[in-house]
Amino acid sequence: MMGAMRATNKGSVRAEREPLFVLAPPRSFTSLISTMLGQHPRMYGFPELNLFMAETMDEFWRGTDGDGERKSTFWPVMRHGLLRTVAQLYAGEQTIDGVALAYRWIRARSKRTTGEVFRELLDRTGPLIAVEKSPAYLRKRRYLDRLLETFPNARFIHLLRHPRAQCESVLKARGGKLMLLMLNALDHSADFPVIEPQILWHDANTRIMEFLDLLPPVQWLRVRGEDILREPDAELVRICQWLGLPCGARELAAMKAPEQSPYAHVGPVTARLGNDINFLLEPRLRPTRLQDYDFAEPLPWRPDRRSLHPAVVELAREFGYR
């Protein structure tokens, strides 16, 4: 795969600590795999921070764009990851009191940029390499551009999941259909509009590819989530080699225990999430029977029983799915 080469131009100590971002549409094993990587002794796994969806911390807190447009119906919940992170790093505990401190910490930085605040979190967790994943960064290209402007030397993992499995998972998730409606993932080619998660899978992965095409191949790596679940040792070694990190028995054992992360559980009532709720309720790496799919098989969510769209099949084949 492209991107499997290790960067050789290290430079300063700050460059050594440039963060790793996991890019993937929602329901692509992001919570599990990002947390696993963050458990490496030389890495620190954040929950979903969503910081680069805003220019300033005031904009982040209000959940509106510069023009006043609302970012998401779910925005109060999308702040949970940052609240839990600040509570953990500055109060030493994710409790109601710790989250109250985090509220004050964030509001005291209302005039600062989100990039400045992200760097402050890196200083707090240094010298560990930060790992972050926020699927909502894929909603608008400017979020990714803002991220890259702040961290031009960051590295990226393009995390994949089979389109049929990802679509079914989105539809089963609490609020999944509402999210698809909000993102206008509707197929209007039938007699009546159909909620179509394929649109989200295709558009999100296409946006990732277009973004990564701007970067040197050494800055990114493509990984299939199913491969990590089937062969965690081999795939984790491959990722660590790309990052230039050791990956012996101690490191593998740490990464295969995501439940040891301070964020791998439901948080206090004032900031419960920050990762997928299913992961938070059962965060262990477990043997998983992964289903094989036939691209031509009718889709259960389609009233007309159509199969995967040809454009989705073509992209999935490019990613190595058969």
Image (cartoon, grey):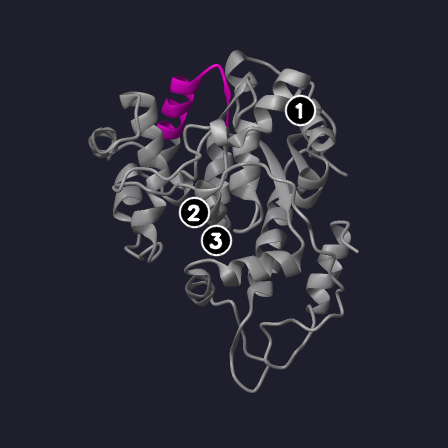
As helix, strand or loop, the secondary structure at mark 2 comes to helix
Segment colored magenta:
116-130
Residue 282 is inside the magenta segment? no
Q: Is residue 93 left or right of residue 176?
A: left
Residue at 65% over, 41% down: 287
Residue assigned mark 2: 277
Q: Amino acid at mark 3?
A: Arg
Residue 120 placed where, x, y %?
Answer: 36, 23
- Report crowding for label 2: few under 14, some 14 to 19, many 20 or more residues within 10 A (C-alpha): some
Residue assigned mark 3: 139
In what quadrant of the picture does the N terminus appear?
top right
Residue 253 placed where, x, y %?
Answer: 61, 22
Nearest the viewer among 130 and 67 is: 130
The main secondary structure of the magenta stretch is helix
Number of the label disc, if any, that sits on residue 240: 1
Q: Amino acid at mark 1?
A: Cys
Q: Amino acid at mark 2?
A: Ile
Residue at 39% over, 41% down: 274
